Image (cartoon, rainbow, N blue to C red):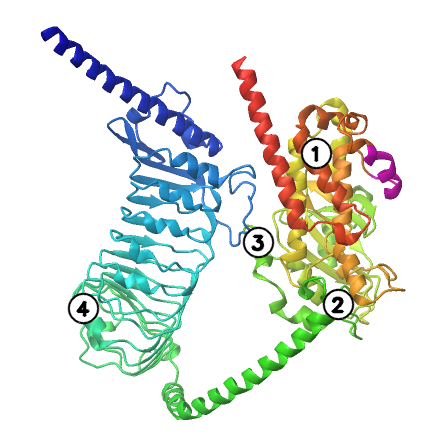
Amino acid sequence: MANCSLFLLLCLTWSFFFLGTYQITSQSQVLLQLRKLLEYPEQLKYWNGEGLDFCFMSSSAQVNITCQNNVVTELKIVGDKPNKAYYYDGFAIPNQTLSDSFSMDSFVATLARLTSLKVLSLVSLGIWGPLPDKIHRLSSLEFLDLGSNFLSGSIPPKLSTMVKLQTLILDHNFFNDTVPNWFDSLSNLTVLSLKNNQLKGPFPSSLHRITTLTDLVLSGNKISGEVPNLSVLRCLHVVDLSSNELDSTLPKMPRGLVVAVLSNNSFSGEIPEQFSQLSHLQQLDISFNSLEGAPPAEIFSLPNISHLNLASNMLSGLLPNHLRCGGKLEFVDISENRLTGDLPSCLSTKSEGRFGNFSGNCLSVDAGHQHPTSHCTEADTNRKHSGGKNVVILVCIIGGALVVMVLLAFVFLVVIRRYCPRGVSEQHLLRKAGPDNSVAGFSSEMLTSARFISQAAKLGTQGLPACRPFTLEELKEATNNFDNSAFIGEGSYGKLYRGRLENGTQVAIRCLLPSQKFSIRNLKLRLDLLAKLRHPHLVCLLGHCIYDGGQDNYTINTVFLIYEYMSGRDFPTQFSENRSGKGLDWSERVAILIGVARAVHFLHTGVIPGFFNNRLKTNNILLNEHGIAKLSDYGLSIISEETGSHGENGGDDKSRQMTIFDDDIYSFGFILLEALIGRSGFAGREALIQDELAFLNNQEERFRVVDSMVMATCSQESLSVVIGIMNKCIHSESWSRPSFEDILWNLQYAAQVQATADEQKMDKTSYQ
């Protein structure tokens, strides 16, 4: 009997040991896979083998792993890719995000294998794409921080099922859907922080039902509407709703509130007397709103208030002479309001240890920085008298607007039926004839109207200098008076020179002659529109110079365009290096093609009206010192359009627009073809189609025409995907050609297929 008991004890001990070993091994594999998916960041360089016991690794400020019972319960990683972009289009950005091959779906699916995870913090790792619903598989999660990444789209609804979640931080991302209204499903939530995204829609009413909430941070979004009564949230200590579009009166706040930041909105009405009862309040910032009336004297004397900012509102009236200031008040700003009378002694800048700003009012102190009393009293009187008139005016405006909207809707329907039978958006095909020297669909009205430039035009402006006018003297100095040593070459748009500005910046200067006689004003409008084009895969336009030949007669002689200088070689040059083994392999070529496709897609859809007919060719694809592809000579048809092209002598406007719309797609097809064959500069495209395509479409005959470097480094599946989309691009019928969305999808799929094939090949090699 004793032997039997001993045997059972040994079996039980062995089973626990085996189970624990299996758990450690399994979780180690998951962590190593996460390292791979994160593309081997420097912070994880010590995760270098399956024999590593992650549960006993020392922690650092960048990486921390905590285990309980041999399973990972806490994972924190802080990377070195903080989100500094102003705008994001949903794709990978070189040197800021993880690469094109990163899959957010695969990454979250791998994370979900850490089933006991309670704390997850992945910050500044360059993670990009929509956050998938399967994040809810981490059902044990209590703390989730995915801040400072490039997450976009909507906040996944299935987050509402993670009932154990106490802290949710999604700051500094690009979520751009409406703010969810299911947060009350997270019954244990204490911290909700969604600041600096692009969330929109009304303030979520469900928030005032989360009685456990202590921190609510929604600043830096586009949230609008009314904020409900927050006084029911008795645990709430921090509220930050700044920099939104909220336009209600100030909401009531809980008595235990410590920090309230409500600045940069459109809050109106008076400051509630209830704010005077917030005895725990330390910081109150309600600046840059439309608040009126006299500020309650009691908020200056709150026992714990240290920071009080009421600046840039429409506050008016007298501040009482007997006003008392709280003993902890260190900063007070009541500037840019309509306050009158004397400044209470406790607010004087002479008060020890207290900073105050009172300028821009009508106070009887600091006369150099105050308005006359009439400025404040007249403004207040006018506002009161205009109240009744405003109601009548508002009714008239609303009625008139309704009539105009009905008429516009009718006109819009007529135009759509007449000009868009195939569903092509007219906003991308604007072409307006007129006497104002307008070409390429850009009238002067359109050029001067900022609303025709979408927010996408701001893409890539981070870190790039603003476009500015240059003088001819600056350009002469940069090029040694356009010396032959600075000459780079000459193309269809004129001569190109290399120069160095006074600050040491290298530039490329394009010298071109406008083919049409624009007025100075019209040309400047066109150049300003061209300057708005910013994208990671477009050569940046740094400035321009308009030269009138020294005649000062408003006749434009020459236009100089100043671009960033690309120190790498152009795309076709890499073809000639294939024989020496230094050329681009297939993966590198596909990456370049994806970058160019994104640039053209942006030119077509990122701005309104779009830029078409960009004369795409491989010679205009330049590489920087990091091998990143950028498109040059884009959009120049707005300045130098050849007359008589695109069916000027025949066909209606719509057919001409469709020709322009499809021209870039057709040209891009030949860029794909040249990337496959490894040659550029063909004299006749049609002859090339006849000679080469027959071999390309036959898998067994491809080796005859496909570049040897491509054949040596590609998978057949990836190659077939690119050949397929190329065939569609150069189809003789324009209606059969794909959109650039389709082109991008196919190229990205080809890159993904190639990456998978390369991994399998590498694994097979290492196994052998």
Q: Give the residue at mark 4.
A: 302
Say left or right for 510 vs 142.
Answer: right
Q: Give the residue at mark 1.
A: 720
- 278 or 476: which is nearer to us? 278
Task: Name the spot of residue 466 as percent of width and height, x first.
Answer: 60, 57
| Viewer-side label of 4, 1 | 1
Write down the region rendered in magenta: 681-694
Task: Name the spot of residue 549 as percent of width and height, x first.
Answer: 82, 63
Mark 4 touching mark 1, by CB under 8 A? Answer: no
Other residues around mark 3 within 10 Å, as few (<14) / some (14–19) / many (≥20):
some
Say left or right for 277 vs 716.
Answer: left
Say left or right for 64 vs 716.
Answer: left
Task: Answer whether residue 684 is magenta in the image.
Answer: yes
Q: CA distance from mark 2 to mark 1?
A: 38 Å
Q: CA distance from mark 4 to mark 1?
A: 72 Å
Which tag, 4 or 1, sits closer to the chain's start?
4
Task: Answer whether residue 696 is magenta in the image.
Answer: no
Other residues around mark 4 within 10 Å, as few (<14) / some (14–19) / many (≥20):
many
Residue 461 image label: 3
Q: How many marks?
A: 4
The kind of residue on which mark 4 rests is Leu
The kind of residue on which mark 3 rests is Thr
Q: Residue at x 20, y 16 (%)?
A: 13
Q: CA distance from mark 4 to mark 3?
A: 44 Å
Q: CA distance from mark 2 to mark 4?
A: 63 Å
The kind of residue on which mark 2 rests is Arg
Residue 431 image label: 2
Other residues around mark 2 within 10 Å, as few (<14) / some (14–19) / many (≥20):
some
Location of residue 247 (image quadrant):
bottom left
Of helix, strand and loop, which one carries label 1? helix
Of helix, strand and loop, which one carries label 4? loop
